[in-house]
Image (cartoon, rainbow, N blue to C red):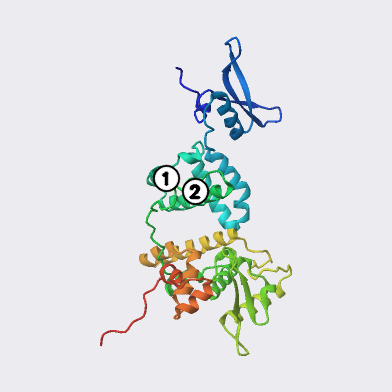
Amino acid sequence: MRPRKSVNRDLPPRMIRRVRLMKSGSEWVGYYYDGRDDQGKRKEIPLGTDLDVAKAEWAKLDCKPIPQKNTLLGKIFDRYEAEIIPGKQPRTQKDNLLSLRQLRKAFSEAPINAVTPQVIAQYRDKRSGKVRANREISLLSHIYNIAREWGITNNENPAAGVRKNKETPRDFYADATIWNAVYEVAVPELRDAMDLAYLTGQRPADVLAMRASDVVDGFLQVSQGKTSKKLRIRLVVGDIPNGLGVLIEHLLEQNKARVSKNPYLIATQDGRKVTAAMLRIRFDDARRVAIKKATEKEDNQLAANVRKFQFRDIRPKAASEISDLGHASRLLGHTDKRITETVYRRVGEIVTPTR
């Protein structure tokens, strides 16, 4: 017997898939039964364009039980991307699409019920990006859960319980020396962004999204983009502005003095909103100058430390320099203090000696 074409390997015996390119550019897919007519001549009997219906018709003609639904994961990926991902936060959408691109390469042609925990473990071990592999397996697990809700499969989630690669949290801490080296050579809008990120303990995207209208009745109102957590950060103690209050007053005065007005707190000197890309360029430029200055002074250790410094390290710097863990956790918007303590606190706990 001749081997079946790859396009039909996922189908029951004597079922054929026909694919035609339409004038519109779209693909038409139909299913047929490879049967015989009354004279014994080969005849393709139409089964329809829906795979599950086609399998039911095939079972009647072949006198076999109706095969269980075993939709290809590629189709489920398509539906998940169209229906589920758009409802997530923009940053999560971007991450999911990146993970889905890798999952498609390995699983698109796999029937949903054919994937086992062993297959997923093999995928994990072959991926060179170990942390990315963890994100991809988590997404695959959620896709299986959603597929179960959709009624596409009744099987257990094969990704549940699959061991993840060990991850080591980033532990870089930007002390005052590192901070000052970059801050001193930063352009004004970068300094403002660094100060605002440090005093609020918020993520870079949330810092850039802060507006003058968010300052209400002595509070800076924050709605975190990643978690939708809402915070009100105090700007005054009694009637006296705290450090953040002084910074906010400075930023508002700057905006009033500009010819081109901007609703955002972080803006360029000519009134343009600072985007994530602009912030990245300005931070990279300042870091490059700081490294050069440290190298010229033959301070190779400082140059190496500054090279590791990233804008995202400002949030854990803030968490590390607040003595009260509960206060730090609330400012960062965490529901669990353990996240703040294990991921964001990057300096040792202060203790006293035995004597």
User: Of the residues under marks 2 and 1, which one precedes in the sequence?
Assistant: 1
Image quarter for residue 30? Answer: top right
Quadrant (top left, top right, bottom left, bottom right) of the C terminus:
bottom left
The percent coordinates of residue 348 (x first, y second) are 36, 75
Residue that numbered label 1 is attached to:
120
Residue that numbered label 2 is attached to:
140
Q: For the residue carrying disc 2, how many other residues have a C-alpha within 10 Å: few (<14), some (14-19), or many (20+)?
A: many
The percent coordinates of residue 187 (x first, y second) are 57, 67
Residue type highlighted by circle 2: Leu
Residue type highlighted by circle 1: Ile
Query: Which residue of the protein is positioned furthest toward the top in this rendering?
Result: 39
Tell me how far mark 2 sits from mark 1, CA to CA: 9 Å
Question: Are the residues flagged by discs 2 and 1 in contact, CB closer than 8 Å?
Answer: yes
| 115 shown above or below 335 | above
The percent coordinates of residue 212 (x first, y second) are 68, 73
Task: Name the residue rendered at 53%, 27% in the picture.
Answer: 7
